[in-house]
Amino acid sequence: MTKETHTNCSFCGKHKDSVKNLIVGEYAGICNECVDFCQDLLKDETPVVEIAPQPSDKMDPMVLKKYLDQYVIGQHSAKIMLAVAIVNHYKRIGKTTAEPELDKANILMLGPTGSGKTLLAKSVARYLDVPFAIADATSITEAGYVGDDVESLISRLYAASGNDIAKTQRGIVFVDEIDKISRKGESTSITRDVSGEGVQQALLKMVEGTVCRVSAAGGRKHPGGDMIEIDTRNILFIAGGAFVGLDSIVKNRVQGTSIGFRARVEASIDTDLDMTTPDDLVKFGMIPEFVGRFQSWVSLEELNKADLVMILTQVKHSYISQYSWLFNCDSVELKFTDASLDLIAERTMKNKTGARGLHSELERVLLPHMFYLRQYHAQGIKTVEIGVDQVEAPAALKAANF
Ligand SMILES: Nc1ncnc2c1ncn2[C@@H]1O[C@H](COP(=O)(O)OP(=O)(O)OP(=O)(O)O)[C@@H](O)[C@H]1O
Ligand SMILES: [Mg+2]
């Protein structure tokens, strides 16, 4: 479009002399009548309930954090660290100038089981609308062994992108259970043999950036089938693991230094995974080159009782809303007393399975009711309220009575 002096309204075509005002910009003009008309149009529009972030907003860590808050309870510092790391990654790969050269910073997520690592990674991918693939590190084998090799990660990402090379190259690969491929180290929890180290080695190149050949049709490699090349340089790798035993490595180190530098030795010092150093991870059994390729660290905390109650009731697509839906299918309303929710959370905490345990607790309590739902409906029972007694001893299954 060229710049010109506008004497007519670009919308209705009227000449400036035949209207009251003509507002002229560099590339277009608009008359007062069209402005009025547009205003009416805008007024009539039904209000938009959820405004999708505009592309520029999307790259604001605060906006990403707010989005994550809808799905992930607690973990505030983890969400902040992750949001910043993600935004920086997409800034780097969107760079159009040669200078400065920027290093890729893949993300390492440390945290107890069921604390939301996988949920965070999935939520980020949904937010960004980029292809996302999850793989379990324990299922990956070194090339030449039976099982999935590291290239299968990229095949999965390619499939998730709908076989679109450009999209694949901007996607996210989440490698879960990364701690299970540690070599035998000083930590007592490690049971895997040296092949874990081989998988770490195999992942190195891919994480850093290499060209991978995968089947053009997606899926497994077909001998003789067409292959395409995927550059992994801009693919973001997120590795997640519970790192059971890492806390005692951190504690030993921190207490060790305190003995060296302080005259008065405190019996116990509070440590958490936030204080982990690359050395601690190497002690745990990760190879230094591997640790070096994951510069952004995000550590998650164990969820407390209040978090668990919020996960049950507040989070989008909460477990309780899912069960309520199932009950509603038979026109029965499902209710919980506050005390029963507290007790479910307390029992879950004892299991040490994080929020994942909530699901099995609810299943245990609700199963008998779900078995009888059709009968309730037939008998005109409209509401089931779960109290503390039912959490302690779920309704008995007495099918013979029906
Ligand atoms: N912080 C959280 N907020 C809301 N829901 C959560 C949270 N943490 C866990 N959940 C719930 O628990 C389920 C399991 O969590 P997730 O898979 O993210 O755990 P994880 O940290 O990856 O555990 P693991 O180390 O065992 O893989 C999720 O699907 C989600 O329903
Ligand atoms: Mg997980």
Image: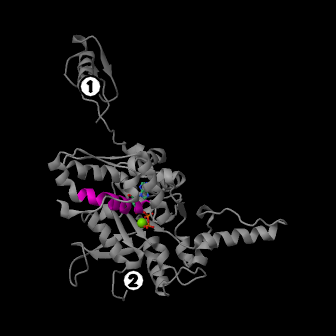
Between residue 96 and residue 368, name the one nearer to us.
368
| Residue furthest right as drawn | 263
Q: Nearer the viewer, mark 1 or mark 2?
A: 2
Residue at mark 1: 42
Residue 214 lies in quadrant: bottom left
Image region (quadrant) for ligand 2: bottom left
Residue type at numbered disc 1: Leu
- The answer, for residue 179, to whether it is visible in the render is yes
Mark 1: few/some/many CA within 10 Å (<14, 14-19, 20+): few
Percent coordinates x, y for residue 238 in the rendering: 45, 65
On screen, residue 22 versus residue 260, left or right, reads left
Mark 1 and mark 2: span between their CA atoms?
58 Å
Between residue 34 and residue 75, name the one nearer to us.
75
Q: Which element type, helix, strand or loop, lies under badge 2?
A: loop
Residue shown at 75%/69% (left/top)? 257
Residue at mark 2: 141
Residue type at numbered disc 2: Thr
Percent coordinates x, y for residue 172 in the rendering: 38, 63
Percent coordinates x, y for residue 324 in the rendering: 28, 49
The N terminus, quarter of image: top left
- The answer, for residue 97, to whether it is visible in the render is no
Residue shown at 42%/57% (left/top)? 120
The C terminus, quarter of image: bottom left
| Residue furthest left as drawn | 378
Residue shown at 39%/54% (left/top)? 389
Region in magenta: 355-370
